[in-house]
Image (tube, rainbow, N blue to C red):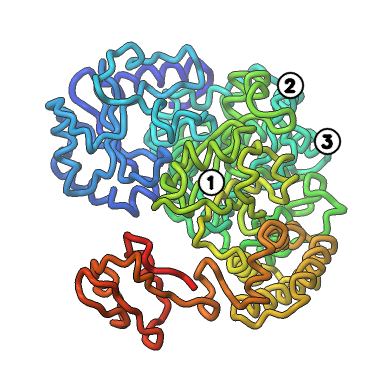
Amino acid sequence: MKIQSVKDLENISQMYSKKLYTPDGIKVNIGMASCGIAAGAEASYSKALEKFPGDNGVRICQTGCIGFCELEPLVEILETGKPRVIYKNITEDKILDAIEDYQQAHFKKKWILGQMRDPRCVLEDIPNPLAKVEPFEGIPFLEDIPFYSKQVKIALRNCGYIDPDSIEEYIVKGGYAAFIKALHEMDAAKIIKVVKESGLRGRGGGGFPAGIKWATCAKHDGDRYIICNADEGDPGAYMDRSILEGDPHSVLEGMLIAAVAIGSGQGYMYVRNEYPLAVKRLITAIRQAESCGLLGDNIAGTGFSFHIKISTGAGAFVCGESTALMASLEGNVGRPRAKYVHTVEKGFRESPSNLNNVETYANVPPILLKGAKWYAGMGTEHSKGTKVFSLVGKIKNTGLVEVPMGISLKEIVSDIGGGVPKKKQFKAVQTGGPSGGCIPGRFMNISVDYQKLAEVGSIMGSGGMIVMDQDTCMVDVARYFMDFLKEESCGQCNPCREGITQVLNILTDICAGNGKEGDIELLEELGSMIQKFSLCGLGTSAPNPVLTTILYFRDEYESHIRDKKCSAGVCKNLFHYEIDEEACTGCTLCAKRCPQEAITGEKKEPHTLEQDKCIKCGICYDACKFDAIAIR
């Protein structure tokens, strides 16, 4: 069906709602994003399909990531007139039992994460068949669980709730209504005004106001281009990937609205090659949108035409930078250029180009539907709306979270993330990817927004958040990120190429026990030089991990250099393990697991560790339940 109007969208929504919320039988949604597949969801999906191959009372479907990656595979089961139930850790051996459990209403609580009402829709007047149902007793609602209770999902509004390969399910949730509205009811100036007034800032790292960028691009003559940056390269970051895998149509719709606003007829999605599932689902979404008349020529009979092509990157981190990305799109080496000519004036093919990232575009449709005031009502004065973070590292609840701007770091790490596991002490959190700063515990009450993070030496970045505990060596953390950035630097400018190399060499020496007096001051001087004189954002932000760890953890640097000690037990040349005889109970667990047979002793008697045999692998330290293995 070719969609021409809002009425066409409503007709599709009504028709598919009857199929989606069938009065007979149940629907089983299995989380089939990369995190779920890695945890075994594909095997669960195949086994469920084998048992229930058709629509014979049980419909087996796929969804994207609902965020709680720690508990994957996640399975949602729903039935008309009853709440949705989310089952956790449903591997191949449990999937059929989980379905039977729901059918018989046994509800084995150890399998259940919670229940949820029908996902909040962007359009308030969309029929909500499951809204007025009686909850199952004893099963918590998802929004009452700490991981979800403080989240507000806008960019992730459909992830984990709909089939990413179904344009019909996207339309049921209000999909493409904003685009049709923009096409028929709004002119370019009005669209840009709404985006400006919403306060939406680019979520790709730079944080530049999206509305101002759109308006500036629209002013320049030429073939204007809409470009989506999905070249997500930060270690531990997977925000964009999850949106593309779970709700690709939301990004396409955001790009379409931007195209109407700036007068563009061609769009490009630059996706990192390491995201094959995201690319696959994008291709499906583009073909579906084309078949429905939402992409292509003369869309909805308005004379507006827009096409989208996908380009996959070759894995260069620097191609996340706008000018390097556009150079790569052109088939050239992905190297940044000086910013005295902005890409909104001369970007891709020397033409006006508007580049935003995946999360930015995904925010646009609900802003047009709900209004600028609605979006601007969330967040802080200079940081509006919500932000998606990938919460990883030494944290109990790893996963993807979307929270209002202005929430504190403590709320994210302690309340949503559940804090540091194994009763270890929290040490720091790094925000902003490899070029972000490491924030110590004393700043955990600061608000998470662009300004506050900058005040403590970090950045928002694209949304990576890595939690570190007492066993993390901050000098080694700085060395790790400098090693990463050295490999990813394009090598075009001396300050970045040579400066990062020199910083890495000094940090490597310090971690190896060869640090010397004056190294800390030299690192500070080099960091300042790299920040001031590098060509692009990679270089200007590269010293952040080094400078913030020196600022907040200088004592660790001094201990490495002066005392030749690594208190965290990471730098192998600077520590050794010992067994505390008073704490050792003789449980023999450490001896059994030691790969070198370096630990000996009788059961229920204190053990000893032969230093000559020890390879400092840390297996005994992790295995000991009585804190009897000490780092000296």
Task: Indicate which disc, 1 or 3, sits on the residue closer to the N terminus.
Answer: 3
The residue to which callout 2 is attached is: 190
Residue at horizontal 66 percent and vertical 74 percent from the top:
507
Say which of 175 and 107 sits in front: 107
Q: Mark 1 touching mark 2, by CB under 8 A?
A: no
Side of 46 where 599 appears, left or right: right
Task: Indicate which disc, 2 or 3, sits on the residue closer to the N terminus.
Answer: 2
Q: Is residue 588 above or below residue 75?
A: below
x and y percentages locating residue 255 in the rendered image: 61, 37
Q: Secondary structure at mark 2?
A: helix
The residue to which callout 1 is attached is: 240
The residue to which callout 3 is attached is: 219
Report, in whole angstroms, how far the alpha carbon at label 1 lies from the one at label 3: 29 Å
Residue type, mark 2 in image: Lys
Check disc 3: other Cα within 10 Å, few if <14, some if 14-19, many if 20+: few
Say which of 588 and 159 sits in front: 588
Side of 528 where 331 appears, left or right: left
Q: Secondary structure at mark 3?
A: helix
- The quarter in which the N terminus is drawn is top left
Q: Mark 2 touching mark 3, by CB under 8 A?
A: no
Residue type, mark 1 in image: Asp
Q: Is residue 558 above or below residue 17?
A: below
x and y percentages locating residue 609 in the rendered image: 35, 80
